[in-house]
Image: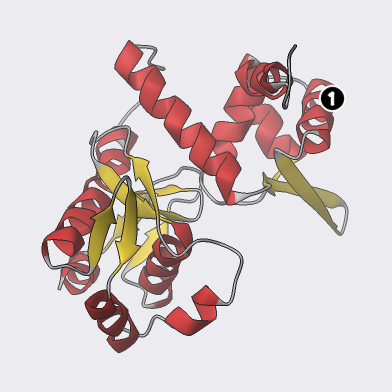
Amino acid sequence: MKDGPDISITAALIGDPAGANMIMALMSGHSLTMGDLAAEAGVTLSTASAHLAKLESADIVVSRKEGRSRYFRIAHPDVAHCIEALVTVSARAGHLRSRPGPREPAMRHARSCYDHLAGRIAADLFEDWIAARVLQWRGEAACLTRKGREFLIDRGIEIATLESGKRPLCGTCVDWSERRHHLGGAIGAAVLTRALEKRWAVRGRRSRAVIFTALGEKRFVD
C-alpha cells in the first residue's frame, strides 16, 4: 500500500528543462515577469504561461499582478531549500550547465539562495559563528546560543521579531559550490537583508550574484 504525498508530480514539474530554468532564475530572489522567465527558459510566452500555471498550481511559485504585468517568485523558503539541495546533488554527480563569462567567480563568492546568503562568504560566516559559539550543532540541526542571541541583537537583528514568525530561526544548506554549510532560516534571511540595507552589497540585476563593495565586505566580515 502506497501512503503519503506523490513526490513524482512535483519532481516532474521541477525536472522539466523549461520549468527548471525558470525556477533557477527565480532563485535570485527577484520577482520576474513571464517575459523574463520565457527568455531564461528559451521558450515562447505561451509555453512559459503553460509551465508557470502548472508550477503555480503545485505551490512551487506564486504570482501577483502589477499594472499590465504579472510577477512570479518562489512560493516558500522550503521550495528554495529543495532546489538548492538538488543543485548540490547535481553538481556532485557532474550534471553541470555551462555558464558564460565572469559570472561564475562572483556566484561562487556570494549569491542569494532565495532569501539568504550563499557562496564562500556565507560558508565562512557559518564556520566562524560555529567556532565563536554564536551557533552550535545539536545533532544535525544548527541552533542559536544564548551568546549568539546577544551577539545578533547587538548587531541590529531583532531576534524576538524573528521568533514570533512561523519560520525556524536557523536552517542549513550544503552550499553547492563550497560543499560546506551556509545559514538559512529566519536568521539567514535577516543577515542578507541587513547587508543589503546597510548597502554593503547589492543583488545582481539578472543573476543570483550578491556583489559586495570592498568596504562593505570588510564591514560585513568584521
Q: Is residue 73 above or below residue 17?
A: below
Q: Position of residue 100 (x, y in %)?
A: 37, 25
| Residue drawn where x is 71% and y is 19% of the image | 43
Q: Is residue 71 above or below residue 151?
A: above
Q: Position of residue 7 (x, y in %)?
A: 67, 22
Amino acid type at circle 1 is Ala
Quarter of the image where one finds residue 35: top right
* Residue 98 visible (yes or no): no
151 or 208: which is nearer to us?
Answer: 151
Can you name the residue that lies furthest to the left here? 131
| Residue drawn where x is 27% and y is 39% of the image | 108
Can you name the residue that lies furthest to the front here? 1
| Residue drawn where x is 77% and y is 21% of the image | 44
User: What residue is disc 1 on?
Assistant: 50
Looking at the image, residue 116 sits to the left or right of residue 33; the answer is left
Looking at the image, residue 81 sits to the left or right of residue 156; the answer is right
143 or 173: which is nearer to us?
Answer: 143
